[in-house]
Amino acid sequence: MSSIPQNYFDENDLIDCVQRFFSKHHVGKLLAKCNGMKEKGVSPVSLLRYKLSNIFIGRSMYMQQRTGSFKEQFSKNTFYRFLNSTKTNWLRFTSLLAADIVNNDSRDLTNQERKNVFIIDDSLFNRTSCKKTELGSRVFDHTDMHFKKGFRMLTLSWSDGNTLIPVNSCLLASAKDTNIIGPVKTFDNRTLAGKRRKLAQTKAPEALMTLLDTAISVGLKADYILFDSWFSNPAQVTDIHSRGMDVIAMIKKSSRIKYLYCGEQLNIKEIYSRNKKRRGRSKYLLSVDVMVGKENPIPAKIVCVRNKANRKDWLAFICTDTTLSEEEIIRIYGKRWQIEVFFKTCKSMLNLIGECHSLSYDTLTAHVAIVFTRYMLLAMEQRQNEDQRTLGELFFFLVDEMADITFNRSLGILMDALMASLQENLKLSDEQLTAFTTDFEARLPEYLRNALHPKAVVA
């Protein structure tokens, strides 16, 4: 009987998986580029590797120390100083890592004709108490339309329609000082810590552009940017379009947001009411061309569809690429749902909210970046295990071999095996075997008889 515990092999597999991920994507070099390094002592890469894999073991550092299973060569103070560092640029780290994964792995697995997208959305990063949490605020949760304590986790992600890769994020505090509950520390605005806190207190549309510019600066590209109605004001759409990317977004039904249509400035409700709707089983109700923006208006297409949750209601989408068909606009916008699955996975499976109880804004930022890295690891492992194209040349050799074995040849192999088995087990003579074969083939459908004797058909 083996004395090795069952989880010994699982733990070794986990260590190998994390090690492969770190080596393949040069995580140590990326961390060094973002000031995540030390002059002496424990390597920051080993600290990051421990934090990354700790969630899969199922025990926190505190419980490992209590039970005597903590075997690392560093103390808890070293670990917490690493997370609380004001010099590590975690925003740039996740962007660089995402760019390396997308440009070196994901793009080779995707058809060049498929449209890649950036997805922008926010989710509540709630805290039970914010009195001592730095920059902890009362933020508005638009899912249940109430103010709650914590942050808004504004997130930018990349997707090819199959795999979603989180790129970067920012924990947004309230832009109003009256809504900030926790302490506000002052730093020089020229330092990384000062810039990080300044970004946290900017409005979401401005922070969104910072996240997008960071992603573009590290080499990430996408054909379209998707977001919901909370970010789809004309100024935001035109600002993104000026950076050379098209927008597909849901339109907010506001009377104050207007578009130039038929020489008039009209809101979406007025545009919808003035046009005749498509009937029958059409995928959309209305499609019109408009101009968006005040100073430098750009052409766009508005597509209205029926709300599946309420058949009497309707939804509207805007697309700055007027060459796209209405069906394609609806299909591409459907990729935005992947980020909702991402938020659910991070909160339910990767312990985004409950794992870190630190009061430091720097530590919370580091924690979010490490959770994003965990998701990248899992996303790529899933893609490697499920996508056959990741087998490389072996996959194509197997495909070529299968293509060489035609249906006619396969049927002939089966018939030869059947005749040999009959003659071996029933001891049939050649005359009896010939009579059996003739009778058996006569009972087959015509297309099977033709497949068994292709030369006779050609003749």
Image (spheres, rainbow, N blue to C red):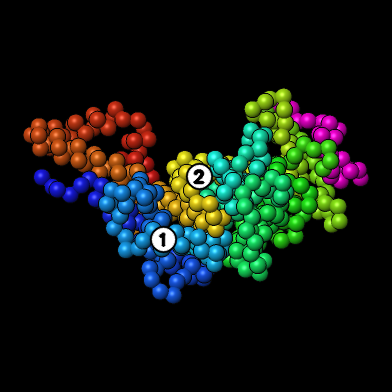
Residue located 72% across and 46% down the image: 178
Relative height, residue 422 to residue 245 (above, below)? above
Contact check, label 2 and label 1, Cβ < 8 Å: no
Q: Which residue is mark 1?
A: 77
In the rendered image, the residue lying farthest to the left is: 427
The picture quadrant where one finds residue 422 is top left
Within the magenta stretch, is there residue 262?
A: yes
- The CA distance from mark 2 to mark 1 is 22 Å
Would you say 91 lies left or right of 446 here? Answer: right
Identify which residue, 286 or 450, lies in the foreground.
Answer: 286
| Few, some or many residues within 10 Å of mark 1 (<14, 14–19, 20+) | few
> Which segment did they paint magenta?
258-280
Image position of 1 with respect to 206: above or below: above
Percent across and percent down for residue 51 are 41, 56
Pointer 2: what residue?
Answer: 353
At 75% from the left and 60% from the top, the residue drawn is 242
Kind of residue indicated by mark 2: Ile
